[in-house]
Image: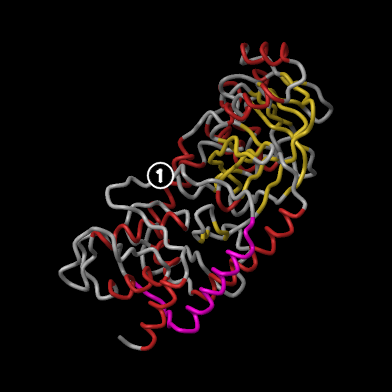
Amino acid sequence: MTPTAQAIVSLIFSVPLLITSQAGQVPDRNNDHIITALDSQTTQQRIDFLNQLATNSTWPKLKIRKMLKRGNSHSLIPEISKRLSALQDLDVELDLPVATSPNLYSNRLRWAVISFQKRHGLQPDGVIGRRTLAWLNVSPKRRADLLTRNMERQHHFFNKLGDSYLLVNIPQFQLGLIEQGEKILNSRVIVGKQKRQTPEIHSQIKNVVLNPAWNVPRTIVDKDILPKIRSNGNYLAERNYEVYDYSGNQVELGNFDWSNLATGAFPYRLRQKPGPSNALGRVKFFFNNDQAIYLHDTQNKRLFNRYQRAFSSGCIRVEKADELANWFGRERIVSKRHWRNAKKDPYLNQWLRLKEPLPVHLVYWTAWLDGTNKAQFRTDIYKKDTGSFELHDHQSEQIDDQTEIAATEKLASLVKS
């Protein structure tokens, strides 16, 4: 064993942070809880470990021309295995057969890749594709820098935090509800796409709106709705929209050829009435901010099955919106009678006041240590932590997944907010 290899092995067994998947387990993408505290000492230990690893190892960029799956052979398999061992995803004691060839993608290696993918918010399928390879190419030094930068953000945040709050970590696509220091609910969320980013906000939820109406922002009218009207003149009527001029007068839909009107300057405001087809679903959680951002339900749940969920126009869609609304109904809604009436009637728009506001925090954390002391990393979807390092190069020549991207964008176009 070379001195470098000995140093890496020594580092691996000197830091008690090894948590890996076990054979036979099904990866649980819902087991992705929001961070609720910062252990600065343990995080610093991990940062020190990664810096030592950077000093004692080389990390050349790996390139592959196609995806690697279990059973494939490739000359880079030994290097990939070495990296997963160094990063503590490959459990050397896992009760699985050793590969017959060092270049063979074994079942043991597949479980290591799954562990690695789960720590990076990737689909844990055990396939080494473009996104998994990009994260394998992130050096220990870069990882240490990311943890350091995010630890500073979390330190400032938790020093000023109360016992009850709602937290959305944007790059994690995750929401957590904390009451008196206890986790009450966690939910997957959809956040803004790169061109329409969800901002970092610290505010207070003061109202829950059951059966909300949707006053459509002008940007969404221009970019999303007008193209649909041009191809379908009945789109507004079919989707239960009301049209108003800028003097506040309602316009009768039957009076105009909307397909032609949508081709030029469109001098109207749109409002989608409450009901089953409303884009905001059954509930909206309102908090003051100057960017018209809020949390809301959605009628279409399909995009929550994606692992990368930056599809909205800035607002946050909550998968468990109904559960979150029911918590507010039990714990904080002032008028139980108005709550019950609005729950029964999907067309009854009702703004409900809270007995006390709930702090809400939209944060941007791309690295942290979870409750089991595993280092978690997420793609820098808005390129806030990128600097000179380009993690997610969508023009990568190594693996072409433009078909997947096109399908995702087509699906996302069905559900706008």
Q: Quadrant of the C terminus?
A: top right
Where's residue 360, x and y in %?
72, 41
Question: Is residue 226 positioned above or below 125 on the image?
Answer: above
Q: Quadrant of the N terminus?
A: bottom left
Is residue 51 inside the magenta stretch? yes
**289 relative position to 284: left or right:** right
Q: Amino acid at mark 1?
A: Asp
Where's residue 182, x and y in %?
63, 39
Where's residue 308, x and y in %?
49, 50
Nearer to the camera, 363 or 133: 363
Residue that lies at the very extreme toward the bottom in this rendered image: 3
- Residue at horizontal 67%, vertical 21%? 330
Residue 386 lies in what quarter of the image?
bottom right
Is residue 202 inside the magenta stretch? no
- Which contiguous range is marked in magenta? 38-63
- Residue at horizontal 61%, vertical 47%? 192
Magenta stretch: helix, strand or loop mostly? helix
Q: Dot 1 lies on which element? A: loop
Where's residue 258, x and y in %?
62, 28
Report the residue marked by disc 1: 28
